[in-house]
Amino acid sequence: MGKNFPNIVIITGLSGSGMSSATNAFEDLGYFCVDNLPLTMLSTFSRLLLPNTEEAIAIEKAALVIDIRERHFLAEFPNELRKIGKKLTPFVLFFEASDEVLLRRFSETRRPHPADTGQGLLEAIRAEKTAMREVREKADLIIDTSEHTVHTLRRLLVERFSHHEAGSPLNVQIFSFGHKHGMPLHVDLLFDVRHLPNPYFEKHLKQLPGTDKKVVDYLEKQSEVQETVKRFVDLLEYLLPLYRREGKSYLTIGVGCTGGRHRSVMVANKLGDALKKDNFEISVVHRDVQK
């Protein structure tokens, strides 16, 4: 199936099958999301997505969760879908899972099943599955989440509905710092470059920052600096696509030296330049360069 990007996605399916996780993924993709929208509001809401709408608020794309919690859902869903289908092309995404998985999920969360009438959880799951057959038949895509984690489900949806070829962009911040000023609190990867020659001990470089050409030239002439940067870049070029594949949106990389003025600054900038060439979203911050 080729990629297309619907501007209105209707998320539905069996209770406990992952609709909430799906909603979070669509929010990350820039969709305006509404959970448990009353079915009677579907036609009204859909007008906000029409081109040249006269409504006060226009929405580019939306993902709407409509399920069995809405009391008119089963009886009115096909008719309401036809109504909005006259002007838009809604994409119906149906989630399901095995009885065993749904039993486990409800047991773990201790949430009441919306179809439970006192006959027990398993009977409620089976009753909902039967009741939802007609809705399931109208789905454009059916996803069984029995074997999915929150992360793998997010990755599947991002890859399917993202305009980016590799899914959602990974925003990487490279953060230089000095160990003597304290470790940063929130970093995902940490590189220590205190093993490299220190410009601090060169009289003509001591007062210059790691962004200065004289400091950069000095460090670039050191073979161990070149080798360290190369190995760091190789590692990150391997790791970053894997982080992106797992659905991570933000990654912070710390680069530390003693004072945070010379080596860590230069190495952080070199890493940033190399990774920008690989089309990652990169920003570089120097915490201690002025200290």
Image: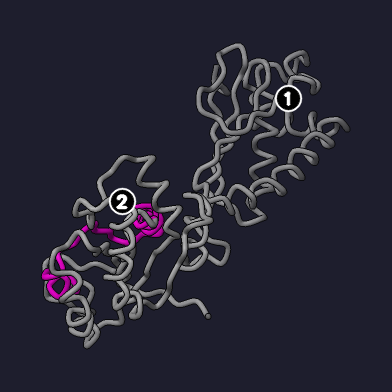
Span of residues in magenta: 18-47
Kindly report which numbered mark, 2 or 1, lies closer to the viewer in this rendering: 2
Residue lying at the far front of the rendered structure: 119
In the picture, residue 5 is in which quadrant?
bottom left
Residue 209: percent from the left, percent from the top?
64, 25
Between residue 203 and residue 290, name the one nearer to us.
Answer: 290
Task: Decide whether the magenta segment is chiefly helix, strand or loop.
Answer: helix
Q: Would you name the residue on which mark 2 appears?
A: 121
Packing grade of label 2 (10 A; few <14, some 14-19, many >=20) is: many
Q: Is mark 2 on a helix, strand or loop?
A: helix
Residue at (24, 84) in percent of width and height: 85
In the picture, residue 63 is in which quadrant?
bottom left
Q: Decide if residue 37 is on the left or right side of residue 166.
A: left
Work out which quarter of the rendered image holds the C terminus and state it: top right
Residue at (81, 21) in percent of width and height: 197
Residue 83: percent from the left, percent from the top?
18, 84
Residue 104: percent from the left, percent from the top?
42, 46
Q: Would you name the residue on which mark 1 appears?
A: 193
How did the renderer colour the structure? one colour
Q: Decide if residue 84 is on the left or right side of residue 153.
A: left
Residue 47: percent from the left, percent from the top?
16, 75
Packing grade of label 1 (10 A; few <14, some 14-19, many >=20) is: some
